[in-house]
Image: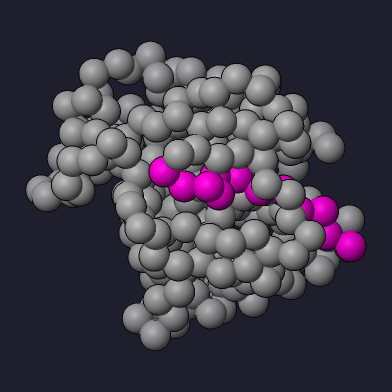
Amino acid sequence: MRILLLQHDPLDGPGALTEWALERGHSITICMICQGEPLPPLDSFDLLVSLGGPMGAYEEEKHPWLVTEKEYLRQAVAEGKKILGLCLGCQLLADALGGKAFRHTCKEFGWQPIQPLEAGSAWFGSADSFQAFQWHGDTYSLPSGAIQLARNEAAEQQAFLMEAPSGGRVLGLQFHLEWTESMAREALAEPGVAPRPSPSVQTPEEILADLSLFDSARKRFFALMDRLATV
């Protein structure tokens, strides 16, 4: 399978997604759309992944390439492509497909519980709550026809699935299962990155206190990607 990654920030890369693709024999192409790299033709990939980033999906005046990406996402949906959105990518998909991305009333930072809904239990391995890495202050409303897959107390919308009329499958995850320990350490080393403490905000020390959470997230992510690749 040919995978195209749209990257929005140097520090927010594919993480465990690269490991999964290599283990499964898939090829990866990265487009740094935020640096003005041209978008490849739609027939050059089978799976499109829109990664995370620090900007808001609605900050189109500040980042004009957001307009370009949203149109590209709509075109990919119309062509029946499989699409995965992660954090910012999830918000971009929701916004591009008829929902709305907007500033949330609280931030999520660090390991936070995710509660799968009935429709999401197959995607996440069970209906049991699990911990996922979060780093966002925005949220989104569901596009028409999308199915909510997960929620938590801080943000009602945590994941969605959309079956396009063209046959494509669109999956959005507000949280990060793909982040690795090394990604987190590098990002957390930046001065002043942590928001104010709150029930949904951890300190950098708390985030790195239990490194087994990165391994658990990786296993869940691999299983989810296997499902997305085959359905």
Q: How is colour applied across the structure in the image?
A: one colour
Q: Residue at x 36, y 30 (%)?
A: 111
Q: Is residue 104 left or right of residue 92?
A: left
Q: Among all residues in the image, which is located at the extreme left?
A: 191
The image shows residue 193 at horizontal and vertical percentages of 18, 48
Whether residue 57 appears in magenta in the rendering, the answer is no
Q: Residue at x 56, y 69 (%)?
A: 100
Front residue of 27 and 172 = 172
Whether residue 157 appears in magenta in the rendering, the answer is yes
Q: Residue at x 22, y 25 (%)?
A: 206
Q: Residue at x 62, y 31 (%)?
A: 116
Q: Is residue 202 left or right of residue 151?
A: left
Question: Where does the C terminus fall, quadrant-wise?
Answer: top right
What is the quadrant of residue 56 in the picture?
bottom left
The image shows residue 202 at horizontal and vertical percentages of 24, 34
Q: Is residue 146 above or below residue 215?
A: below
Front residue of 91 and 141 = 141
What is the quadrant of residue 44 in the picture?
bottom right
Q: Is residue 70 above or below residue 174?
A: below
The image shows residue 46 at horizontal and vertical percentages of 75, 52
Q: Is residue 95 left or right of residue 65?
A: right
Question: Where does the N terminus fall, quadrant-wise?
Answer: top right
The image shows residue 92 at horizontal and vertical percentages of 55, 64
**Residue 132 visible in the current orientation:** yes
Give the magenta-colored segment's residue range.
154-165
Q: How many marks?
A: 0
**Residue 20 visible in the current orientation:** no
Q: Among all residues in the image, which is located at the extreme bottom?
A: 61
